[in-house]
Image: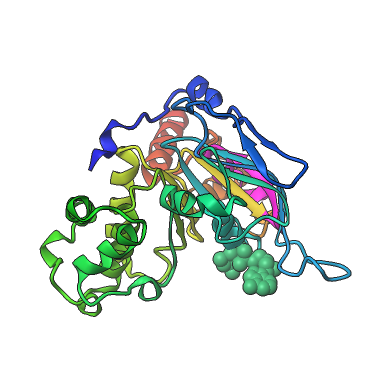
Amino acid sequence: MSLGSRARPRRQDELAASLRPFSGLRLRSGGFFVAPRIAAPLDPIVRLEGVSYSYDPGAPEPLWALQGVDLAIAPGEYLAVVGHNGSGKSTLARLLNGLLLPTRGDVWVGPWNTRQALHKRDVRACVGMVFQVPDNQIIATTVEDDVAFGPENLGVPEEELQSRVDEALHAVGLWERRSRPPHQLSAGEKQRLAIAGVLAMRPRCLVLDEATALLDASGRADVLATVRRLHAEGVAIVAITHRLQEAAEADRLLVLDHGRCALLGHPRDILSDTDALARLGLEAPEVPELAARLRRRGLELPAGLLTPGELAEALAGQRALLR
Ligand SMILES: Nc1ncnc2c1ncn2[C@@H]1O[C@H](COP(=O)(O)OP(=O)(O)OP(=O)(O)O)[C@@H](O)[C@H]1O
Ligand SMILES: [Mg+2]
């Protein structure tokens, strides 16, 4: 897979540069004009501009699942999304690749507005989705055929199809199981199969909506390792999760609250602010929670402790001071 060749912004100035808007204009006719320019490599992959979504927009007082969200996802970045039940995470995920269209505002995927019916396939190929229940995404009778289904539908020529399928199966570690019926796979393997199906469409961004929620510890570890590897190879990741500790390894963390962006920043800053998390109905991960309790008992610990190792080191420093 040619994933390794993609640029992956690391420095802050690169990330900031990547957040420049696309040059799309809405026409009075309701259509869109997209300036015919070649996208700079660091243009965002997905950009939400003032996006609101209601499942009942015609109601006298519509309920808003998402309200006024502005967000740009840079090439190769790892964005984690958390929020209490019903905060709008899955709605956001479905807006990212045009499964839902905004009630207000616009979603741009590369140069395409998701409202452009003509580019629906391009949008879906660029932003792949993996859901919580892999069985719903499994279609074919063998692992291999299942992975081929997506690119086949995109019209990928026969001669390219096999190489795409092989690459995707290698990427998720299922190549040896390619002839098996999918129902014989474990839950974690099925989820990796779902990821392979998306990868075969060569997406620039992979959106995982609680993709590890139903897996046991080992299935979860396998899927997370696959996601980590894809990220290292340059695929942008949007990972929706209820496990705040999983969000710690992301480049940025978005916290949704009643359909609004409540916090957006570095996971270390957000996850260690236990009071802010509690106000948003979220339980802080164990280490920041324990560090906060120890601080309340008078220990002077630095901010931003996330891992047991960091906490142990900070406590060792305290012991040295008390001696
Ligand atoms: N198909 C639907 N029809 C009507 N309302 C919906 C529908 N799907 C979601 N909603 C409502 O939209 C809001 C946001 O839901 P969403 O599923 O996006 O939240 P979530 O953060 O993914 O929740 P969870 O953590 O439970 O998965 C909620 O108030 C929910 O009840
Ligand atoms: Mg959800």
In the rendered image, which quarter is residue 282 located in? bottom right
Magenta stretch: includes residue 259: yes
* Residue 218 visible in the picture: no
Height in image: 237 above or below 44? below
Q: Is residue 94 left or right of residue 224?
A: right
Q: Is residue 81 left or right of residue 56?
A: left
For the view shown, which residue lies furthest in the top direction?
13
Residue 162 lies, in percent from the top left, at: 17, 55
Residue in front for this viewpoint, 46 or 302: 46
In the displayed structure, does residue 188 sit left or right of residue 88? left
| Outermost residue to the right | 60
Q: Quadrant of the N terminus?
A: top left
Q: Nearer the viewer, residue 260 or 206?
A: 206
Q: Magenta segment: does it hold 315?
A: no
Q: Which residues are magenta?
A: 257-277
In the rendered image, the quadrant that contains the C terminus is: top left
The residue sitting at 31% across, 45% down in the picture is 230
Residue 135 is situated, as x and y percent measured from the top left of the image, at 36, 76
Q: Residue at x 46, y 28 (%)?
A: 321
In the figure, residue 315 lies in which quadrant? Answer: top left
